[in-house]
Amino acid sequence: MQYAAGHGPARAAHHLVPTEHFDALAAGRGDAGAVRFLSTTEYSRRLLLLRALLDGAARTPGALGPLPSPDSAWDALTAAQERAPAEFRELLLHPQVGAWLAYGLRRLHHTAWGDGPLWTDLGQLFAFCAAASVRAGLPLRTTVPLRDGAVMFPALGLARLPGRPRWATAEVAVEAGRLTVEPHREAVGPPGGRPGGDAPGWLGLRRLRAPVAGRAAEVWLDDLDPYRDLSRTRPPERLAPERAAGWEEGLGQALRVLEECDPEAAGALAEGLRSLTAVTGPPGGAVRSISSDDAFGGLLLSPPPDPVAFAVALVHEFQHNKLGALIHLLTLERDDGQARHHAPWRNDPRPLSGLLQGAYAFLGITEFRSRHLDRVERAGRAAAEFEFALSRRQTREAVRTLAADPALTAHGRRFVAGMAARLDAWEADARVRPGVDAWAALAATDHRTEWRVRHLAPAPADVRALASSHRTGLAPHAVAAATLAPDPDTPWSHPRTRLIRRLLAPPRDPAAPPATEPPCPADLALLSGDPAAVPAYTRLLAEDPESPEAWTGLVLALATAAPATRPLLHRPELLRALHRELRATPPDRLARWLTGAPR
């Protein structure tokens, strides 16, 4: 099997990232040519992972259990690659193959635990060999593992053999491009022995087809592969035909929206997107999307409510795909992995690598929001302005945090500088009305302030000393910076940002049911600039002195009503901690004392 282009013995080769691709990717872009380059590099990586898995299986006694030797797999794959190199490349680049390779290696290295014997995961190698032989038109006889009476052939389909033990094997034959699975004198396989369609004992992997960038994009709709979940195995969950048709229609509409706004991005996505797995979304109607750098070109997605949300999810996850592939080539940061940064779109603290991934995804989302803004109908214009303005602010904040982190490498600094330069182009964008931009600023500040309230804690000795000063009538004194004390358990509902979105949303259909959640009067007062927000939040804190949302609302309301208290936006956790020591003192009075603001 060749690891580098050309003829003769296998040889090592290095990929050099062209400057134009690096700079385009740093700006959040990258056309179809850049994606083809990343696909080429991912193919090289998959070859290395495949060889590592074969070598690891050969070194580990019993790794393949009752299955054939790694050498037989190597021979079959080498023959398939030589006979049909383009088909072999496409199969190896299938996202679920990448997820399986990574998962198998983690099992070999004892960093992942499966639900069955090791050979059931490593043995997927032989199903991969069978799929490669089908594509190459080569004969093959081999043995494959069964998982709950089924075996998946990548980018082909699932053979179902009910009545077998949970962990068992089956014989597979490939002849003249026809695949059959032959346990106990029964035979199952694709209709006519070739890919496509269902048959007794066989479920074919479906394709979604949508026109984009002057071609028909084809994406696998994967509801079968056990490795489609990207991090763990998952049983098949066959979608009803009408749901599959709905996904095809939704993908087509999303790609049309994207192509109308950004033909280059649509072409790049059509070049790189290979598979989509439907998942269940979180409560409340939000969209859930997931991708992995082990599965370039793949994503998991819950049903988006409309084509724009679908397009945003595609852009979001494909940004992760591009950055993940680039990080396989270049080291952008050397961080200790500690989750310590505020990410403006996440509730939890993030490591530097996670913040970089998030900022890059939101750079792409900001690009889309900017390009889509002028195509929005009048009724939805205010909401679209808000989403663009909020994304622009959040991404800018994250990029500034990244740029200040010394753990970035030289490549990382150049990459983040490219992100910052793209954001600079939107800084003077005047298409967002001042009132909408002010709400976007409030939403961004709200998230950052509540994140601090939830995850940072002042030193207890400093808090006690401040409490003593307050009791004796002294002025407050400087204290040390708070330290990270993550609170992962308290629910976080973002009520004010949700309220802004509700207020800016287009008029509702009179026949639609009303919103079930009445707005909080304190939040309404805050958004309207009413000074009554301060006593309203104070009353909420009297009912629940530990409420992070009420503390955040109070600090925001004070900053609006009494600008001298604005420094508390940078240390809101200090106010809540001090109030724990001085419960009898109203929190707004403590805030004014801490900042020296007049009462």
Image (cartoon, helix red, strand yellow):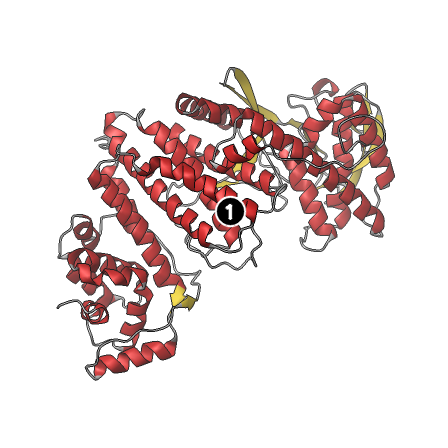
Tell me residue 191's x, y (percent). Answer: 70, 20
Left or right: 136 as drawn, with respect to 468? right
Between 180 and 484, the one lying in front of the other is: 484
Which residue lies at the image location 32% right of the left edge and 49% below the top edge? 444
Residue closest to the far top? 214
Which residue lies at the image location 38% right of the left edge and 40% below the top edge? 285
Tell me residue 543's x, y (percent). Answer: 23, 66
Determine the image quadrant of residue 94: top right
Left or right: 559 as drawn, with respect to 330? left
- In this rendering, is residue 594 above or below 557? below
Which secondary structure, mark 1? helix
Left or right: 85 as drawn, with respect to 503? right
- In this rendering, is residue 344 above or below 422? below
Left or right: 519 as drawn, with respect to 488? left
- Residue carrying label 1: 413
- In this rendering, is residue 485 above or below 216? below
On the question of residue 160 being in view, the answer is yes
Residue closest to the far bottom? 472
Which residue lies at the image location 66% right of the left edge and 29% below the top edge? 155
Q: Which amino acid does label 1 sit on?
A: Arg
Quadrant where the image shows the N terminus: top right
